[in-house]
């Protein structure tokens, strides 16, 4: 492929037109056909008028000419709404197609690094514009604008073609002059600045401020901390910055507009002076004068219609979506493994000299971690905030790969296992578990499970009285309900326990009881241990009442294991664990609940 052709194909406008048939080939064909037909009609109308004038002039039969004028006129009227309907429909299809591509690009990579990359996240903001229409019309409107503008452009070109019948230089001069306005104004186009880092960042911040204002999640803090005015101000500031940038771009147009006017005025002056002189000399008959004067005016359509604006607004997000797809894949990639993970872990998990730092950070989370977890046993991990406990859980799920060292499952490097196969063996309650806006059933078994297992898991998690399995767990839905923090945690726990019933071999519990009441925690933990007995369980907790029940406990500090042993062994050791345990024991040796029942917490 030659270089200019390659450059053309990389242009956002080209990518936009290339997406139309991919979104809907039939509608796209209709869209183009109607566009060309509508574009040709003004020139046909001019010719028809010439024929009519000629027929009157020569006193011949008017029927043919009148019929042509009538049909052209009717088509001009009828095709417009038809084309608008096709455009709106095609625009919606394009938006749906882009949504699919965008969702796939985010979801498909097996890792999650691409969702934490600031550059990609900013591009994601531009990419969403086709749908949100914050800085331009949404796609279904834009495709119609583009259609209207393209019809004018084609109409102008068709008029220029007819004008060749007069003389060769007139259409070239007029088309050149009107065409030059595109070039002149495009260079200073309103949306030229659209894709700069500043615009994207302003858009993203404005978007965040908007979500803070309208979404229930932030509503409490917003009010309590008096952030309402701050949020509105933030939104206003960022939006104002966007408008300033647009205004600045518009101001850039002043000089090019003056140049455009001059060029266009001179070109039209020459052509119409020539037409007038030819008519006055008798070199141009009236019927031909009618046609050529009309098409000379018609060539101006090349410049009108706001094509630059509409096309930029539609093409920028399309290009962003298409750019994100190949960019996200490597950012979220993990080296592919092909070995089966069936039955794993059967012997155990071994973390060997693990080194890891998060992408784009300097500080290593792990700098030589060694740890072994025999299959079927339970290991509790304790350590200060930021010690790396959650990170280890994420590495075990293979959401990231180590920088060096390895995690081995039954002597096989985790990277050599098929990642989906391995993830089917793992289940987890994450510290920041997701509250799916779906039914209780789907929350417990997102991938599906027999009701008996779902109900059993809910009972194990002490959540059997919460709601009917079909109740949507979100207020915004018909019959929906919301749960308390602790109730949600029980649902998340049930999700993991249900997966164990479905055969998961490794259970990661990251602060699974942090939000449970004392009575609930005491009661539930034995049930969790029973329910996960066959599985290898890794429990992360700051609550020593929970931790002490694990077969072994490891104290993590600065990314290394500093103590490892059973509760009794570590107490006897008198080290970190023992100190932390004593500290908590002094605070809560026993707790009495609201009904006066006393629980041994430790
Ligand atoms: N996605 C991320 N990108 C960059 N750094 C991160 C990310 N997640 C965590 N970190 C950093 O990695 C370190 C370990 O974090 P991690 O979440 O594993 O701690 P933790 O032991 O689970 O702490 P806590 O007890 O508070 O849950 C911290 O310094 C944290 O700031
Ligand atoms: Mg954590």
Image (cartoon, helix red, strand yellow):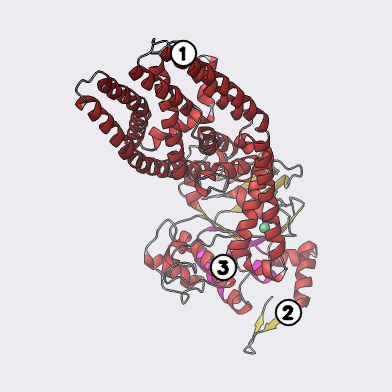
Classed neighbour count for the residue bearing mark 3: other residues with Cα under 10 Å, few (<14), some (14–19), many (≥20): many
Q: Which stretch is magenta?
A: 524-553
Q: Nearer the viewer, mark 3 or mark 1?
A: 1
Could you tell me if residue 17 is visible in this image?
yes
Q: Is residue 206 above or below residue 262?
A: below
Disc 2 Cβ-to-ligand 1 distance below 8 Å: no
Classed neighbour count for the residue bearing mark 1: other residues with Cα under 10 Å, few (<14), some (14–19), many (≥20): few
Where is residue 255 shown, x and y percent of the image? 67, 29
The residue lying at 37 percent from left, 63 percent from top is 450
Residue 528 lies within the magenta run: yes
**Closer to the camera in the image, 559 or 104:** 104
Horizontal arrangement in the rendering, residue 310 relative to residue 587 (left or right): left
- The answer to which of marks 3 and 1 sits earlier in the sequence is 1
Check disc 3 and report its element: helix, strand or loop. Answer: helix
Classed neighbour count for the residue bearing mark 2: other residues with Cα under 10 Å, few (<14), some (14–19), many (≥20): few
Horizontal arrangement in the rendering, residue 394 relative to residue 167 (left or right): right
- The answer to which of marks 1 and 2 sits earlier in the sequence is 1
Where is residue 484 shown, x and y percent of the image? 56, 73
Kindly identify which numbered label has been placed on residue 489: 3
**Closer to the camera in the image, 44 or 345:** 44
- The answer to which of marks 2 and 3 sits earlier in the sequence is 3
Check disc 2 and report its element: helix, strand or loop. Answer: loop
Q: Is residue 500 above or below residue 314?
A: below
Distance between mark 3 and mark 1 Cα atoms: 88 Å
Where is residue 241 shown, x and y percent of the image? 69, 47
């Amino acid at each position: 492929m030659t270089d200019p052709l390659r450059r053309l194909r990389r242009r956002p406008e080209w990518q936009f037109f290339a997406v139309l048939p991919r979104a809907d080939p039939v509608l796209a064909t209709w869209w183009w056909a109607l566009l060309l037909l509508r574009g040709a009609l003004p020139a046909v109308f001019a010719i028809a008028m010439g024929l009519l004038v000629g027929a009157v002039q020569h006193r011949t039969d008017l029927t043919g000419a009148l019929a042509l004028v009538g049909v052209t006129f009717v088509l001009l009227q009828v095709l417009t709404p038809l084309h608008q309907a096709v455009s709106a429909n095609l625009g919606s299809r394009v938006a749906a197609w882009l949504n699919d591509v965008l969702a796939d690009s985010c979801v498909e990579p097996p890792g999650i690094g691409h969702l934490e990359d600031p550059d990609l996240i900013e591009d994601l903001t531009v990419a969403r514009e086709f749908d949100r229409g914050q800085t331009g019309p949404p796609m279904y409107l834009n495709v119609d604008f583009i259609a209207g503008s393209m019809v004018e452009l084609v109409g102008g070109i068709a008029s220029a073609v007819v004008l060749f019948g007069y003389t060769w230089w007139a259409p070239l001069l007029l088309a050149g002059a009107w065409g030059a306005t595109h070039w002149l104004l495009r260079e200073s186009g309103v949306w030229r600045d659209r894709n700069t880092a500043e615009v994207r960042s302003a858009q993203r911040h404005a978007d965040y401020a908007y979500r803070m204002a309208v979404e229930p999640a932030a509503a409490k803090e917003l009010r309590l901390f008096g952030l309402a005015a701050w949020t509105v101000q933030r939104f206003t500031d960022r939006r104002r910055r966007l408008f300033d940038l647009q205004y600045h771009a518009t101001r850039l147009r002043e000089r090019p507009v003056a140049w455009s006017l001059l060029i266009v005025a001179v070109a039209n002056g020459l052509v119409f002076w020539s037409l007038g002189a030819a008519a006055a000399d008798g070199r141009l008959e009236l019927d031909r004068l009618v046609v050529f004067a009309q098409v000379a005016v018609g060539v101006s359509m090349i410049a009108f219609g706001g094509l630059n604006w509409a096309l930029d607004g539609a093409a920028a997000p399309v290009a962003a979506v298409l750019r994100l797809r190949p960019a996200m894949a490597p950012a979220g990639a993990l080296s592919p493994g092909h070995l089966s993970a069936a039955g794993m872990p059967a012997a155990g998990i071994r973390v060997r000299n693990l080194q890891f730092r998060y992408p784009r950070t300097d500080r290593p989370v792990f700098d030589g971690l060694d740890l072994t977890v025999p299959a079927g046993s339970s290991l509790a991990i304790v350590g200060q905030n930021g010690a790396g406990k959650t990170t280890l859980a994420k590495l075990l799920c293979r959401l990231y790969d180590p920088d060096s060292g390895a995690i081995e499952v039954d002597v096989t490097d985790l990277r050599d296992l098929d990642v989906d196969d391995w993830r089917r063996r793992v289940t987890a309650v994450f510290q920041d578990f997701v509250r799916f806006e779906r039914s209780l059933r789907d929350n417990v078994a997102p991938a599906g499970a027999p009701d008996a297992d779902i109900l059993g898991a809910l009972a194990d998690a002490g959540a059997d009285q919460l709601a009917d399995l079909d109740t949507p767990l979100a207020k915004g839905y018909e019959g929906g309900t919301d749960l308390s923090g602790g109730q949600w945690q029980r649902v998340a726990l049930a999700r993991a326990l249900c997966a164990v019933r479905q055969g998961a071999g490794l259970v990661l519990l990251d602060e699974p009881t942090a939000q449970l009441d004392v009575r609930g925690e005491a009661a539930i933990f034995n049930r969790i241990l029973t329910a996960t007995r066959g599985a290898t369980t890794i429990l992360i907790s700051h609550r020593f009442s929970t931790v002490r029940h694990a077969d072994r406990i490891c104290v993590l500090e600065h990314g290394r294991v500093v103590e490892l042993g059973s509760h009794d062994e570590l107490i006897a050791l008198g080290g970190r664990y023992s100190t932390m345990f004593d500290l908590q024991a002094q605070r809560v040796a026993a707790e009495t609940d609201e009904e006066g029942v006393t629980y041994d917490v430790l």
